[in-house]
Image (cartoon, rainbow, N blue to C red):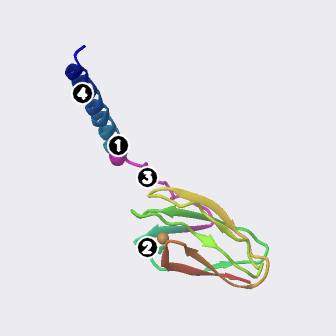
Amino acid sequence: MPMSLLGNVIAIVAISCIAVGSLWAIGNLTKETPEADVSHVEGVLLQAERSTFNGTNPDIAVQVNVPKKLVVVNKDIVIHDLQIKDQTGGILNFETAPLKTEQHFNAAIVAYKPGTYEYFCSYHPTMRGKIIAN
Ligand SMILES: [Cu+2]
């Protein structure tokens, strides 16, 4: 095979691979994530939307040593998470995974001592609210 023809064949193969790769990438970008159904959630539902939780970052009341179910769902176009990072040992600390659009995370709030604690999104300083344990 003459060198110039071999070069053309390699170029065609390379271009084909790039074209297929691009189509695959576009397909992934446009693929729809199924909508998270949160209509039957028991306990507390915190829905991240327009960079707040439930529009108001609501206070959550819990009783000491009574676990309360918590579902965090991302209905926004950007990534959110939810964390409890308390230093006093008065509440169970946790963090959700980084949640993409329509992803959700099941957790429980467990307070060990009465007090006011904070939940927050590590990506957005305005997304923070209180957990009040009695
Ligand atoms: Cu956020």
Inter-mark Cα distance, 2 to 4:
47 Å
Please state which of residues 31 and 4 is positioned toward the viewer in this rendering. Answer: 4
Main SS, magenta region, reads: loop
Quick check: 130 above or below 33? below
Q: Of label 2 and label 1, which has the lower sequence position? A: 1
Q: Quadrant of residue 93?
A: bottom right
Viewer-nearest of labels 4 and 1? 4
Which residue type carries mark 2? Answer: Ser
- The dot on residue 35 is 3
Q: Earlier in the sequence, mark 1 or mark 3?
A: 1
Residue where numbered disc 2 is placed:
51
Q: What residue is disc 4 on? A: 12
Q: Residues within 10 Å of mark 4 (few under 14, many from 20)?
A: few
Q: Nearer the viewer, mark 2 or mark 4?
A: 4
- Disc 4 marks a residue whose amino acid type is Ile
**Label 1: element kind:** helix
x, y percent for residue 69 = 66, 65
Identify which amino acid the numbered label 3 is placed on: Glu
* Amino acid type, callout 1: Ala
- Looking at the image, residue 52 sits to the left or right of residue 105; the answer is left
Q: CA distance from mark 2 to mark 1?
A: 28 Å
Q: What segment carries the magenta color?
A: 29-45
